[in-house]
Each structure stands twice: as C-alpha cells, then as structure tokens.
Image (tube, rainbow, N blue to C red):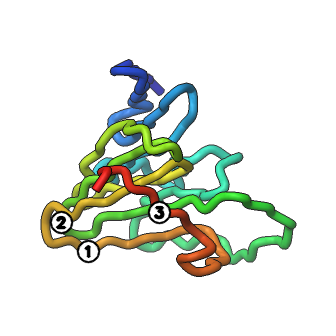
Amino acid sequence: MMEFKLLWIGILITMVNQNIKNIIFKDILYSSVFDLKNTNEGLDFFTSDDSFLQVGTWNYKKGKILDAHYHNTFERKSYLTQEVVLVIEGSIVCNLYTTEGEFITSEEINKGQLIIQYQGVHEYEIKKDSKVLEIKNGPYFGPEKDRTRINVRND
C-alpha cells in the first residue's frame, strides 16, 4: 500500500491509497475521508483494529453467503463519541477544528464518500440538497449532556 503525505500549515494529510485520506493535526488523527467508488473485493476495513468505530466495506459477487455468526460480549469503554457521516446524495463540507476552536481544514464530502470524526470539533455545511446517513457510538445522552457547542465563527 503506497502512502502519500502533504504537509500544509501544520496539517498532515496522508493519502493511504486513492480511497483513503487521513487528516492529522499536531500528530493527532482528527478525521478520515473515504471514497467508496473503488472498494476492494471481499471484506475490507478502513479503520484500524484499535479504532472505536469499525468501518469497512463488503464487495461480493452474487451468490456469496457470509457465515452465520453473532458477536461475543466484551466490556468496551468509550469516553468519546465518534461519528460517521455518509453522503448518499448531494454534497456537504465538513469544517474541522480543535476543541479550542482552532481551524484545521475543510473537506468536501460528495455522494459515495464518507467521513469519520475521531475527535475535535466538526461543523457541516450543506452545499447541495443532500441525503446523509449518520452513525455514531452510543448510548446517546441527549444534546445538553452529549455535546458542547462552540462559536467558531465569532458571531
């Protein structure tokens, strides 16, 4: 797997391959953008085994049967909500910031692309009429307990 790196004003953007872009700021992975147009055959996970959210693709031919299974019970602790946003139709922009409000970068996410928010602040702008699927770890404690809004636009 070839990895390309671009350093721009303290932001390290790594292209793991043509489908995966990692956004790293001050040596911290904030987000990953995935393009679903060219998925590998079979089961292929984008995220590492130690990531709280596990995101992968299935690319199988007609007639394939996946083994029947269930998932074993383990205690898993999470102190942070991570989020996946998949653009089904349309186009959005995700603006990334540190928790102190320092701007990191903006990423346009189009139909067939997804972004994983591992940490930090994210803000979405809807650029075209869009249908988006959002997935995050739970349980959800409601907007007052589960998230903190910050004014990144100073208005």
Amino acid residing under circle 2: Gly
Is the C-beta separation of discs 1 and 2 under 8 Å?
A: yes
User: Of discs 1 and 3, which sits in the foreground?
Assistant: 3
Q: Which residue is mark 3?
A: 149
Q: Which residue is mark 2?
A: 90
The crowd level at tag 3 (other Cα within 10 Å; few <14, some 14-19, many 20+) is few
Please state the horizontal and vertical placement of residue 150, each as a whole percent of the image: 45, 57
The crowd level at tag 1 (other Cα within 10 Å; few <14, some 14-19, many 20+) is some
Secondary structure of the residue carrying numbered label 3: loop
Please state the horizontal and vertical placement of residue 30, each as a whole percent of the image: 50, 42
Q: Visible in this render: residue 6? A: no
| Residue 131: image tag | 1
Above or below, comparing residue 47 to residue 125 in the picture: above
Amino acid residing under circle 3: Arg
Tell me how far mark 1 sits from mark 3, CA to CA.
Answer: 23 Å
* View extreme (bottom): residue: 142
